[in-house]
Amino acid sequence: MKAIRGLFPGRTLGATLSRFSNPHSTLMSASFSSGQANMNETKGVTDSRHDLEALNRFTSGRWLWNEGQQLACRYVKFDLSTLLQLAASAIGSKSCTQVLKISEGQYNKVFQLTMDDGREIIAKLPNPNAGRPHFTTASEVATMDFLRNVLNLPVPRVYAWSSRASQNPVGAEYILMEKQAGVVLTDVWDVIKGKQKVQILDQIVDIERRLAATTFSKFGSLYYKDDLPENSDPTSPQYRDSTGKEVQSETFGIGPTNHRSFFDFRRGELDIDCGPWSTVTEFMTAIARREIATAKSGLRYPLMPEGLFYGPRQYQPSLSKKLTALENYLKVAPHVLPENKATHASVLWHGDLHSHNIFVDPEDPGRIVGIIDWQSVSACPLFMQVGRPAFLDYNGPVPDGLGKVPLPPDFDSMDPEEQREAKELHRAQTLHNLYLVRCLQGNETVFQAIQGQNTLRHQVSVVPGLVLMDYEPLLNNLLRDVEKEWEQITAAGEDGSSSGTPFPLQFSKEEVEQQVQDGELWAQGVELMDAFVRDTGCFKHWDGRVSDGDYEKSRRELDEGVKRFLDRQARNYEEQREWLKALPFVD
């Protein structure tokens, strides 16, 4: 069985396609006072570093396929002059003298604004693909406030914000926040001492401990109460703080989820239940029904697929296969949740703790001073969110057990380059094990949730959320495994006796044969995709993004790779046409 890495597309791809690195954003700057930022004054500008209109566009790379759509969903039109005036006013400065575009990730424009008195703040404007208008920004601000002022986590302070683009003079949603002090962990990770890396790891474990200990009575996203929809439950939601005390919040409320899995890839256009939900079973049911609505609408995953399906002699996803698998899952869903109920708790979690989101003290780089990027963080079940923090990710096997990781037995006979690689893997595996040990010592529920990720009950709970990515053959395989273990799953009482609940599914011999065949073809498609990536060599990012400088070379490599693939896989002209239609990389 192929290992499952998580529920949500962005997170799953981040783990599945860890062979791709994130390209660094380019910097663009413009110098002027806030009163001078008039678009009419940019006529004749030829230097892109001073092209003010480029602040609206994505300028940090290109895409090898679907480029027009990718650029369109990252274009933000806004009144720069007004934004700068608001920013200066928010911190009591007279004017802004410089704008620096410092980051262009998937979902936001981020600018560093320097004032006339030398102070610097950050302006963050969500792209159209960031999530639902209003809710995404409103929730991010409330979440940052809660994390900073209730949980005392190192999160930037928000100075001013607006989640209503049509009601503010900027013409776009924005957040004005303090510039995070320190340096990004990326800049120092390779040069700091092992002891300092352990200190960083311990602080992350402590932050996660506080997050895991703060549990909510509902599943959804956090808002200020004034920003909740009018039809929301007016009851103040409870949360259990890190000391175990139940708190009735008068400031915050749990409302509809902003998790991107409910809005990415045009899902936001569908009429689906976005919560909030009172029980974990309601939440899991909503995920499956979301995937049912997605399948019925005909939406397909537009980025890099898990496998090359749809082509000649490959697995052929279909609406009926997706609906059957999901409807079958719904019949067993209440019974197959992970056995450890403590991991069902509704918690906030940072699902993308890579080294660009962690800031450390440059004078003491073993001390974390800030964590950024809390957009779309939602109160979801703990078991769906935990995992090794991304800054500890590495390419290589996971050690057996939690003991001391040894160097390879043939280390002394390796050449210098092989020894260097072996030492690098050894350090990464050692930190991986240490993270788990620290969780076991001080954050046991998180440790149990991580250890449970390879169990049947965990996998059959998370795979339904991946049906957009054609995971239904794996879901069917898991459901057949559930049938084999049904008596154990439904065992009741301390004596372990069966509850007598009959297995609600019936698979005919023909259905099982078809499911097994689909599963084999699905695995074949995954291997085909891996081989395609290795052969082509042009992929730098899981959505086809490359730097401007690499674009022409990568485009040629992709075209040549597709040609070699067709030569290998297509038996005739008709099969070539079928493959060209199936491959997502051919516009």
Image (cartoon, helix red, strand yellow):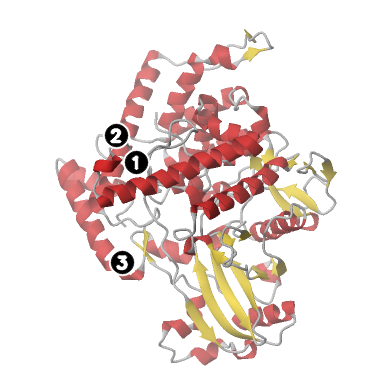
Quadrant location of residue 247?
top right
Residue type at mark 3 is Tyr
Query: Looking at the image, which is closer to me, 374 or 361?
Result: 361
Quadrant of the drawing holding the N terminus: top left
Q: Position of residue 319 (x, y in %)?
A: 43, 35
Q: CA distance from mark 1 to mark 2?
A: 8 Å
Q: Secondary structure at mark 2?
A: helix
Mark 1 vs 3, N-terminal side: 1
Q: Position of residue 571 (x, y in %)?
A: 15, 40
Give the vertical position of 249 relative to 66 (above or below).
above
Q: Which residue is mark 1?
A: 307
Mark 1 vs 2, N-terminal side: 1
Mark 1 burial class by Cα count in 10 Å: few <14, some 14-19, many 20+: many
Mark 3 vs 2, N-terminal side: 2
Q: Which mark is residue 381?
A: none
Q: Secondary structure at mark 1?
A: loop
Q: Which residue is mark 2?
A: 524
> Badges 1 and 2: C-beta atoms under 8 Å apart?
yes
